[in-house]
Image (spheres, coloured by chain):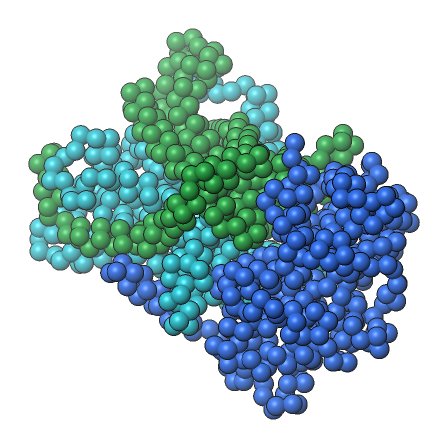
Chain colours: A blue, B cyan, C green
Amino acid sequence: MKLKQAIFGSAAALFAITSINPPAARAGQKMLNVSFDPTRELYEDYDVAFATHWKLKTGQEVTINLSNGGSGKQARAVIDGLQADVVTLGLAYDIDAIAEKAQLLPADWRGRLPDDSSPYTSTIVFMVRKGNPKGIKDWPDVVKPGVQVITANPKTSGGARWAYLAAWGYALQAPGGSAAAAKDFVAKLYQNVPVLNSGARGSTTTFVEREVGDVLLAWENEAYLALNQFGADKFEIVYPSTSILAEPPVALVDKVVDRDGTRAVAQEYLNYLYTDDGQRIAAKHYFRPRLASAAKYGPAFPKIKLFTVRDVAGGWQKAQATHFADGGVFDQIYQP
Amino acid sequence: MPPVEQLPSGPSGSRAVDGSSGAAGGRVPVSEASASLCRATEDPVWARRLIIGVATGFLGIFLIVPLVSVFAEALNQGVGLYFAAITDPEALSAIRLTLLTAAIAVPLNLVFGLAASWAITRFEFHGKNLLTTLIDLPFAVSPVIAGMIYVLMFGAHGWFGGWLMEHNIRIIFAVPGIVLATTFVTFPFVARELIPVMEASGTDEELAAITLGATGWQTFYRITLPKVKWGLLYGVIICNARAMGEFGAVSVVSGHIRGLTNTMPLYVEILYNDYNFTASFAVASLLTALALVTLVAKRVIGGKVEHPRLPTVAGDGVEREAA
Amino acid sequence: MAGMIRTTRRVLPGFGLTMGYTLAYLSLIALIPLSTILLKTEGMGWVRFWHVVLSPRVIAAYKLSIGASLIAAAINSVFGFIVAWTLSRYEFPGKGALDALVDLPFALPTSVAGITLTSIYAQNGIIGRLFVPFGIKIAFAPLGIVVALTFIGLPFVVRTVQPVLQELEAELEEAAATLGATRLQTFRRVIGPAMLPALITGFALAFARALGEYGSVVFISGNMPMHTEVVPLLIMTRLEEFDYQGATAIALVMLVLSFTMLFGINLLQRWSASRYAAG
């Protein structure tokens, strides 16, 4: 026990020294939004709007800190003790993991907000080089020999899991589709992948900046963002005939907000996402808003046939167990 | 590990004796040898040119091209954008955190280095080799593992996680965790640099001081410290460079909260992932400049230390035995 | 002499203080945290442990990490020796700057090294582009990993070999020359054997350093399972899959490997020291 005390002692001393931080807005409330990669710009914008809204509503100042990273990595950090008041991640499974492994929020968290707790949606599209030199129009073109596909590692990237399931769903629902055909299809697809970055952002960099690959499987919003950043004269967005309805979820982390006394502001932070303002900002950053009236603030979101995870994989828990767990379908693709 | 009161016959003991007899033997540089022999011991001109060519070519490709390209990428959008990138509030907070981390980790490791090298070079005890190996440990432990062990200790499900949560103390995903991981990765540097210098300086003067009635602290401040100050400074500079540049270990424990827990190397990665390549290389260029300053400082101080060299696991045996 | 040393041990103060502090600090910062790996792995049982560390993907990662580290260390041994030779034997303009620059990989943060090397060696980078016509891919291929590991290991061989080379008795070479040995013979019979221990030590150091490298490799490797996934990345991946035991199991094998490396280096050092003294 002496040892433990010694460790606590030195830890406390370290803490005491290092907690003297620059005075970053001591007054008012502080909260932390732990989010995934593709929402950096969205939440930077939204946080400003929300701070104004909160000030008008309650007269209080609120400082929102933002942490971005791969969805799985972020969930891991929250499980290990990153003090997130709200999590806004790439897929429901990651928040399920927080609920299951750390019990920081109830298992039925998805029912607590409208639309299964996904205030905005997106889908997986193809980003190709200008002029579409390889003539990529739909999913079958992506698995042709000689086409290089860029996508991230589904094991570590939420976006890549959506991309994987989009391909799976397409093959499953295609005429004569079956689980075996779908497995064959994704196996062919990943044989065409030369680089598996650990996050969706890394994949975009590989495709855009390093000029590797013919087609990038991208979040719709990331594709538009990249088009904006790197010039529409270099890339094109191609919509496949069908794709997946990606539903990035948001949730309140009960244990944290209750301890820090931030429940009210955190709850309002999430609710505000569903208002006209929140939906407008989401649309502006190329996420598909749930409110039809807000869609005009974004690009023309083409209407393509979208299936859900439930349709093609029986929900996230099942999808994870079947496809992405150790020894799952994704691992089998890479088995020699 | 009690001190052994006699001269051990093991290699470490004989090394200590060699060391105290002074490492600086009379080397005769090749250039001072007689001219005819010189010619016989030198390489033919063509061979010399070839070797120099290969060496500079190798260093050019592996060191100079990367070095130049950091600055080229950083400045390719103009000086204005460069300064905007490095004076961004988030960049400033990353710089501040990096400085703070180094400001805590380096002194901690400095004190450790002094204590460890005093114990190792001034006394004989069982397990000295083991201790020296343990000091080298961070060289061989992957930075990822270095970060992970602190998560296993202080993370919410770690050994002390529950207790820390109860008392609302944040170690992981906060500054203390970053400092701890950095300290772990950099603790060998000062010690590694000091041990050979202290061993080489011998104990005669210290013994004399003690015999004349000086206290231990007086002896340390007045005799030992002045003798090893350049070696000490050298170690501190290297330790500092590594502390400011650590990426892998810090990445595991940081939590990546913008403006709060991002150090400069992490911020470089974040900007890179933000498609903000120019800004990313701008911040990288600051770190590179720091590395260059370190190299210059090493060179200046290196001339004043007996043997300017990288503190490596190899230690000093080879060299001193050669003397 | 022996008598004097006996006195030294008794007269100089501070053994308890410095030794105590050293051990306490080591324990707090390194040993206790490292023991968490052992304890975490202990909970998983042998069957699962072997299952994890011997799965094909993990084996592939070990093969890649060890293989790429070996190749990088070998490249560094060859070129590092040439660089050390050049820096210690020849005079040429810019030598001082070049000498100082050798330590750059040591002082440069690995994330900076990673993005820089990637931008240079990608197929549109200034060096990577030169290899495209030959169908050689550097970045996002095993070759890229070797490049990154060569970069970070470079100072180790140079800085281990250089001092030995500088202090090599000039008289020895002169004697060999006087006895009629050709330059090549001198090199092979005199310089070579004297340098070998330092060279091996440098090789081992570069290898040990490369084995655990994460920051620079993660940017330049393609991260493909079974193909370009190094062990530290696999540990990171396991962590992100919430598989802590898997991560610690792989880390434990790494740790044992590193310990063996360190121990080996220490032995090497002793061997080379005695060998040098004898020769």
Residue found 73% across the figure and 49% down from its top = A164
Q: Is residue A195 above or below residue B216?
A: above
Residue at x-position 44% and y-position 27%: C199
Q: Is residue A228 above or below residue A208?
A: below
* Frontmost residue, B81 versus C197: C197
For the N terminus of chain C, which image quadrant? top left
Horizontal side of C16 relative to A306 (left or right) equals: left
Does any portion of residue C170 appear in the rendered image?
no
Residue C185 in view: yes
Residue A41 pos. (x, y %): 70, 68
Horizontal relation, residue B306 to residue A221: left or right: left
Q: Is B44 above or below relative to B5?
A: above
Rendered image quadrant of residue A278: bottom right
Q: Position of residue C259 (x, y in %)?
A: 38, 38
Task: State which quarter of the image contains the C terminus of chain C.
Answer: top left
Q: How many marks?
A: 0
- Residue A128: % across, % down: 84, 50
On screen, residue B294 versus residue A129, left or right, reads left
